[in-house]
Amino acid sequence: MSEGTTGPLGPVIPERLGTERLRLILFSPDDVADMRAGRRQDRWHPDYPRQDDVDAAQMLREPGPWGPRHVVVGPLAVGSIGFFGPPQDADTGAPEVEVGYGLVEDARRQGIATEALRCVLSATDAAGVRVRARTEPTNRASVRVLAKTGFTELRGSDDEGMLVMARPLPGGPR
């Protein structure tokens, strides 16, 4: 995996991300069209996309490294992970971006979400971008994933009652 850099539009992360077990593949325009139309692809798990994945596809305006990605294990996409747009300047002294993720039921409790999140966090760290996440306070599995991946700053809850957490940059602005 190559390190992120700063381009003319701000911080950049690699388009290709993955680990030994996972590939994190950016949604293509065809993927987005299929998701929006309710069409299935052979390379997707039978329960994918979930409604949250379709919602992520609905938000995509133009493809790029800060968009949603399929979480692929073996030959099948089993979930998604990605950002809600490019980083924005924040009062923390570092650009900041929000991440979201989710998996089909069959892929849960295997460390896949934690591994996928660690992978994207490695790229955001290299780019000097701080990350925040929102989750239902009762979603213990998601809270555990965030805790395991260094989301130590509790920002309270938002207008929707979602728990908001942030992850400090290693050795950077808090």
Image (cartoon, rainbow, N blue to C red):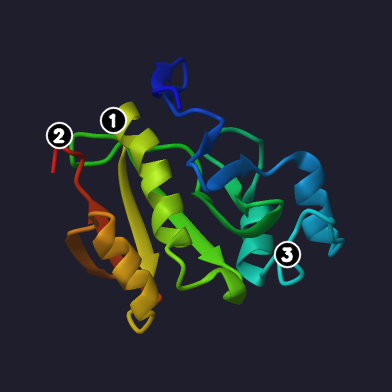
User: In which quadrant of the rendered view does residue 145 lie?
Assistant: bottom left
Residue 135 is situated, as x and y percent measured from the top left of the image, at 38, 70
Up-down relation of residue 133 to residue 157 (above or below): above
Please rate how many residues cluster around mark 2, counting C-alpha atoms within 10 Å: few if below 14, some from 14 to 19, many from 20: few
Query: Most extreme residue toward the top, as rendered?
Result: 8
Question: Residue at left 66%, top 70%?
Answer: 51
Drawn side of residue 172 relative to residue 123, left or right: left
Residue 79 is situated, as x and y percent measured from the top left of the image, at 60, 61
Which tag, 2 or 3, sits closer to the chain's start? Answer: 3
Drawn side of residue 141 relative to residue 170, left or right: right
Could you say whether the residue bearing mark 3 is in a helix, strand or loop? Answer: loop
Residue picked out by circle 1: 128
Residue picked out by circle 3: 45
Question: Residue at left 57%, top 44%?
Answer: 24
Find the distance from the CA under tag 3 to the CA under tag 1: 34 Å
Q: Please name whichever residue, 75 or 32, is drawn nearer the observer in this view of the structure.
A: 75
Amino acid found under the numbered disc labelled 1: Gly
Give the label on residue 172, or none: 2
